[in-house]
Image (spheres, rainbow, N blue to C red):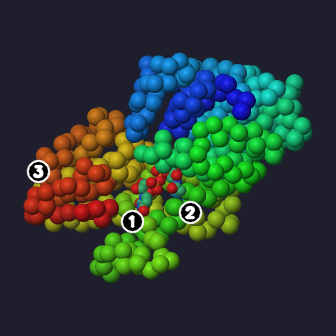
Amino acid sequence: MHSFLRISVLGLGYIGLPTAAVFAENGLEVVGVDVNPTVIGTINAGKPHFGEPNLDALVRRVVEGGKLRATATPEAADAIIIAVPTPIVGHGETSKPDISYVEAAARAIAPVITEGTLVIVESTIPVGTTERVSQILGEMRPDLKFPHQVGELAQVQVAHCPERVLPGRILHEVVHNARVIGGMTRKCAQRAASLYKIIVKGECRVTNARTAELAKLTENAYRDVNIAFANELSFICDKLKINVWELIAMANLHPRVNILQPGPGVGGHCIAVDPWFIVAVNPNEAKLIRQARLINDAKPDFVVNKVRERASQLRNPVIACLGLAYKKDVDDLRESPAVEIVKKLAQQKIGELLVVEPHISKLPQDLSDLGLALHDFDMAVERANLVLLLVDHMSFLQVDRDTLKDKFVIDTRGAW
Ligand code: SAJ
């Protein structure tokens, strides 16, 4: 039997809320903490504040059942999971991780921890940050002993258990993925593993905190590098007038080749961000990882140039921009290359833009400030003389080929 009756999750976003809800579903009393009053109100009304398959029903169940409650002030708990954002500051090569939310979370929980509390960081963090959390707690609570001070004799356990779930499949992956559990000490790791085993059906592999920190960053850098390889091929194929998707399908027939797909660029809050956490700490060693980021970041401009080239051949370019999300079938616009492309097209006044994004009901302010509005898919495709596919949403795939016949088509995803 495990020893966790009540846990707390700090940060009720894309990771924190599903994690909190799944623990609650498994019988624990869960206190969710967030700084945003709207988020707190929405969750306490039994609703998630963002879209994710099956999350609505789950949140309603656990809130109505009294197992999950959201609040603004941290409370004591057997385990406290920190799942706050770790953005980057700066741009491109000057990007640096901003761990201030994690540090603030550590300061916020310091007053409520007691002997025996397990503190877990799930947020993606640069190597060394788990130790930093332990230090902050130690500075604020001189009455307790922490792992960075006394190792296994610590009265409070600290661990890093990075989240690895894929948006769109979060509730499945949070249960079925293997977890990397990095303890500041062995006991910290084992205690954290016993917590995750309550909800995780996959393997819980224990290691030290630093290895866990780099493992998470490595997973996303690996994917970024592989997407960069595909995007670089798309630049090469454009010059050589070869269909890059056909090329990749051919190469992937080889039993040991598995190239990913080129696209309009890499978005989302993870893959486009996390590799910089490695580069910032190891600028001299992380050459390939840096270059991959630069290649992927160059893709939106390449698409804008393609559109400009095509539009210049039209008297009155009317451009249907299909999709704003960072990837298919999600409503998440964070770091989305599609948004960047649409913004640039609008700023450069390249034709009349008809923006389509079926997963949102309102355009973000910065896009409506550019004079853009949301349009219906069929109407936009019908009216446009240039159709730009930016996201391969399921609902875009069954397009009537006849309506595209006399139009320029730029398919950045190779979906059509
Ligand atoms: N993309 C391509 N070509 C591809 C695959 C993806 O251009 O072949 C683009 C997507 O369109 C999107 C971006 O890359 O813009 C990232 O999408 P994704 O589906 O690869 O990943 P994310 O950002 O949704 O989630 C990733 C996952 N990490 C890995 O697969 C290694 C997820 O497991 C992590 O939990 C998540 O980052 C995270 O939170 O770190």
Quick one: label 3 or label 1, which is nearer the N terminus? 1
Q: Which residue is mark 2?
A: 222
Q: Which residue is mark 3?
A: 383
Quick one: label 1 or label 2, which is nearer the N terminus? 2
Discs 3, 1 touching: Cβ within 8 Å: no
Q: Is disc 3 surrounded by few (<14), some (14 to 19) or many (20+) residues within 10 Å?
A: some
Seen in the image, is 258 located left or right of residue 280? left
Amino acid of disc 3 = Arg
Q: Is disc 1 surrounded by few (<14), some (14 to 19) or many (20+) residues within 10 Å?
A: many
- Res 360 quadrant in image: top left
- Between residue 84 and residue 186, name the one nearer to us: 186
Q: Secondary structure at mark 1?
A: loop
Residue 354 visible in image: yes
What separation in Å lies between label 1 and label 2 (alpha carbons)?
Answer: 15 Å
Q: Residue at x 44, y 52 (%)?
A: 267
Marker disc for residue 262: 1
